[in-house]
């Protein structure tokens, strides 16, 4: 048997939560998530396939908010400071660039994440880095699921999971269908 008891339990809870949740991807006050991409060799859209080249567990995507975190203004030096900070730390966080210009290294995707989801929300480069690198906050719960529906297997294949504050939102999943981890599908031979 290729799937352990813990993984089965997590999958059961996830399926239950998704079954009873009827939320689309929308802004929810107080919502924030630390987003992870799951490695998926069968992902035709690229991010999961790309992540699978670097990790068999996860790849960091970024931290997202739905509202400003402070009144800090944006500075013209923010991007340069962010690039200098993240350049040496990205690989330790399993954070790879999915932008073809970076070829899996740093820092086009990381710069996009900060400039789109950190700076506009009032965070300095160091504040965003601390938020992104905090994988173990006790205030974190599953609150975002992105999946791609596989017509052959008739299941939603998990492609991204987010952990943070706020209600669970889903994106791309077909309602009423079970969820599977990508590696589970590759073991059964389904793309």
Image (cartoon, grey):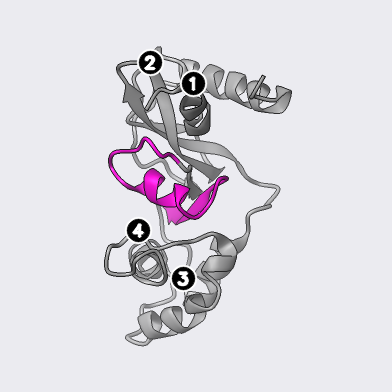
User: Could you say whether the residue bearing mark 4 is in a helix, strand or loop?
Assistant: loop
Q: Earlier in the sequence, mark 4 or mark 2?
A: 4
Report, in whole angstroms, how far the alpha carbon at label 2 lies from the one at label 3: 42 Å
Image coords of residue 189 (percent x, y): 44, 23
Image coords of residue 15 (percent x, y): 52, 19
Query: Is residue 56 highlighted in magenta?
Result: yes
**Residue 46 appears left or right of 22:** left
Q: Earlier in the sequence, mark 2 or mark 1?
A: 2
Residue sitting nearer the eye, 142 or 26: 142
Tag 4 near tag 1, CB within 8 Å = no
Q: Earlier in the sequence, mark 4 or mark 1?
A: 4
Label 3 or label 1, whichever lies nearer to me, is 1
Label 2 or label 3, whichever lies nearer to me, is 2
**Residue beneath disc 1:** 188
Query: Is residue 60 highlighted in magenta?
Result: yes
User: Could you say whether the residue bearing mark 1 is in a helix, strand or loop?
Assistant: helix
The stretch in magenta equals 40-65
């Amino acid at each position: 048997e290729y799937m352990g008891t813990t993984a089965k339990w997590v999958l059961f809870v996830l399926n239950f939560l998704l079954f009873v949740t009827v939320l689309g991807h929308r802004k929810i006050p107080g919502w924030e998530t630390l987003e992870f991409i799951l490695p998926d060799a069968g992902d035709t859209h690229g991010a999961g396939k790309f992540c699978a080249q670097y990790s068999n567990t996860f790849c960091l995507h970024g931290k997202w908010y739905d509202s400003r975190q402070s009144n800090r203004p944006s500075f013209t030096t923010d991007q340069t400071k962010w690039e200098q900070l993240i350049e040496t730390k990205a690989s330790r966080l399993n954070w790879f660039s999915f932008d073809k210009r970076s070829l899996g290294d740093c820092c086009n995707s990381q710069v996009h994440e900060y400039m789109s989801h950190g700076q506009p929300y009032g965070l300095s480069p160091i504040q965003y880095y601390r938020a992104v690198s905090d994988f173990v906050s006790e205030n974190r719960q599953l609150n975002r699921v992105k999946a791609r529906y596989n017509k052959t297997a008739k299941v939603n294949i998990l492609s991204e999971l987010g952990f943070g504050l706020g209600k669970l939102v889903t994106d791309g999943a077909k309602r009423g269908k079970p969820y599977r981890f990508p590696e589970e599908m590759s073991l059964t031979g389904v793309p």
